[in-house]
Amino acid sequence: MKNIKAVIFDMDGLIFDTESIYYRGSQEVADELGIPYDAEVYNRFLGVGDSEIWATYHQMYDEEFGSDLVNDFIKLSYERVVDYLKSGVAEMKPGLLELLSYLEENNIPKIVASSNNKDIIEDLLKKNNLFDRFSNIVSVEDVKNAKPDPEIFNKAHEVLGIDMDNLLILEDSNNGVIAGHAAGIPVIMIPDLIQPDEELRSKTIAILDSLADVPAFIEDKK
């Protein structure tokens, strides 16, 4: 592994503890509409873009509940989650601020590459005084294919203009790790809701418990 010259951050489940909020909003609305939904269903879509999730919901539920009710589920759960996020309930993940300070002290630029919408990414970063600490944002609007397709990380590589071997991706989700590996960029996984299996581990350069562990890892590789 070469010296790290830039770091690419996922957002949901890595910078912020948002996955629990997405699940909460989706579960509440599903219960209200009588649609069978649980954490196992939610976890299947970690790191996947909205359009793909919504298409799969229609495949899962249209026959029993009809497309109109499924559209209501999609619309209302999205609105519920956005309301929660805009209320500022998303907490920063442990070790984030220490890692950002370390990268800044070592003049290592950092950007966000997230399957989320740009307005939500910007809103969360601004509410937590983090917006100016990232030099750029690559969002779902900037690509045609969501993770696990590598397009979003290829775009981040293009934005940074740094050799792939000198980049580092930080991810929490299976699909994010698969996408980063497919892009040919080194990936560290900090698991959030799901622990990796051996196949996924083989696609990373390390599995760490917290963002707080990343500075020591980078130092050790110098």
Image (tube, grey):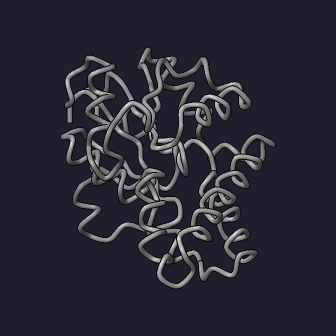
Q: Is residue 17 above or below residue 151?
A: below
Depth check: give the residue in front, 82 or 19.
82
Q: How far from the left and from the top, in percent, is residue 168? A: 33, 35
Residue at position x 51%, y 26% in the image = 102
Q: Is residue 168 above or below residue 6?
A: below
Depth check: give the residue in front, 8 or 99.
8
Residue most extreme to the right:
87
Q: How many marks?
A: 0
Depth check: give the residue in front, 176 or 212.
176
Identify the image quadrant of the N terminus: top left
Residue at position x 70%, y 51% in the image = 79
Q: How far from the left and from the top, in percent, is residue 151? A: 27, 39
Identify the image quadrant of the C terminus: top left
Q: Is residue 40 left or right of residue 76?
A: left
Choose top left, top right, bottom left or bottom right for residue 202: bottom left
Q: Is residue 11 left or right of residue 76?
A: left
Q: Is residue 134 above or below residue 145?
A: above
Choose top left, top right, bottom left or bottom right for residue 186: top left
Residue at position x 57%, y 75% in the image = 39
Q: How far from the left and from the top, in percent, is residue 137? A: 47, 26
Q: How far from the left and from the top, in percent, is residue 25? A: 70, 61
Residue at position x 46%, y 40% in the image = 114
Choose top left, top right, bottom left or bottom right for residue 30: bottom right
